Structures are given as structure tokens and as C-alpha cells.
Amino acid sequence: MVITYDSCETNIPAIDQERLSEWINRVVVTNGYEIGEINYYFCSDNYLLEMNREHLNHDYFTDIITFDYTVSDIVSGDLFISIDTVLDNAKEYGCDYFQELHRVMIHGILHLMEIDDKTDEDQEIMTQKEDESLALLSNID
């Protein structure tokens, strides 16, 4: 299991990397997968906007871009998270910054496990899986 945390044009948030890595592994295993190599990159809005334009031809801000390298049941990928957008979303949704950050972090992992959010029905399933995953985090000391 390899989970790394790095930054691009910003600082890595003050997170407990060991605890979060254990949580992510638990979520992946609970869903019938194994952890391969997961790389989190915490970025500025502008950095992620440029990536969104370059790689996805989308000209808008987003909270996460996930590059999926999963093979079979080995979950692997690069996850780029905009700290700016996460903070804005936390304010908009009236929740704690770290709660929103954790939701976005696990959202990307769920995408790597083939959980989508393109339709309303898919979004309901994604939200349910996010909530279940966040509940697991509260059980990790």
C-alpha cells in the first residue's frame, strides 16, 4: 500500500496522513479492492483550472480531478485537489473545512472504484458511499 501526499502551488493541509491513509485503505478493502499506489496532490484553484483545461478540455474550476490507473481490483491513481475550492465549498455547504476535504478525498477514491456521479441516481449512490466512508473515519483513532 502506497499513499502519498504532496502539493502544487500551495501547502499540504494540516492532516493526519497516517490516520487518513489507514482510513482510505479501510474504505478500499471494505469495497472489495486493494490499494495500489494513490498520490494526492493539493493544489491552488489556478493550478487545477489549468489541468482541467489541458487534460479534460473543461474551462471551469473544480474541487478534484482524478486520473485513474486502477487495474483489476488494485486501486491506483493521481488525485489533484483544489484547496481553494474545498474551502469555498465548505463555506457554501456550512460544514467544517476538514469534513469537506475528507469528503473530496474519498470522492476521488470512490471514482477509482468505478462509482460514478453523472446522473441523479449515480449522485445519490456517490453521496451514500461518501457518507458511509466518512463514518468509517470517525472509528479510526
Image (cartoon, rainbow, N blue to C red):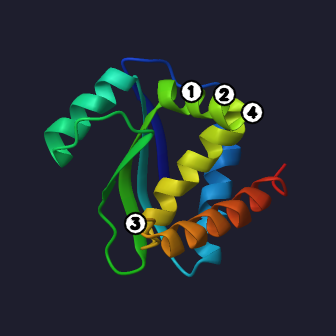
Q: CA distance from mark 4 to mark 3?
A: 26 Å
Q: Mark 4 near mark 1, Cβ–Cβ under 8 Å?
A: no
Tell me which residue sits at (22%, 29%) in the image: 50
Q: For the point 47% across and 72% down, which residue is it?
A: 115
Say whether residue 12 is left or right of residue 69: right
Q: Earlier in the sequence, mark 3 or mark 1?
A: 1
Residue 88: assigned label: 1
Q: CA separation, marks 3 and 1?
A: 22 Å
Looking at the rendered structure, the secondary structure element under dot 3 is loop
The answer for how far apart the CA atoms under marks 1 and 2 are is: 5 Å
Q: CA distance from mark 4 to mark 1?
A: 11 Å
Give the mark nearest the N terminus, 4 or 3. Answer: 4
Judge left or right: residue 19 versus residue 89. Answer: right
Q: Which is nearer the N-term, disc 3 or disc 2?
A: 2
Element assignment for label 2 = helix
Q: Is residue 15 visible?
A: no
In x, y percent, where is residue 59?
A: 23, 36
- Number of other residues with Cα within 10 Å of mark 3, as a class: few under 14, some 14 to 19, many 20 or more: few
Amino acid type at mark 4: Asp
- x, y percent for residue 102: 64, 45
Q: Which mark is residue 91?
A: 2
Relative to residue 129, is residue 137 drawn left or right?
A: right
The residue under label 4 is: 96
Identify the element where label 4 is drawn.
Answer: loop
Count residues near mark 4 (Cα–Cα under 10 Å), then give few for <14, some for 14-19, many for 20+: few
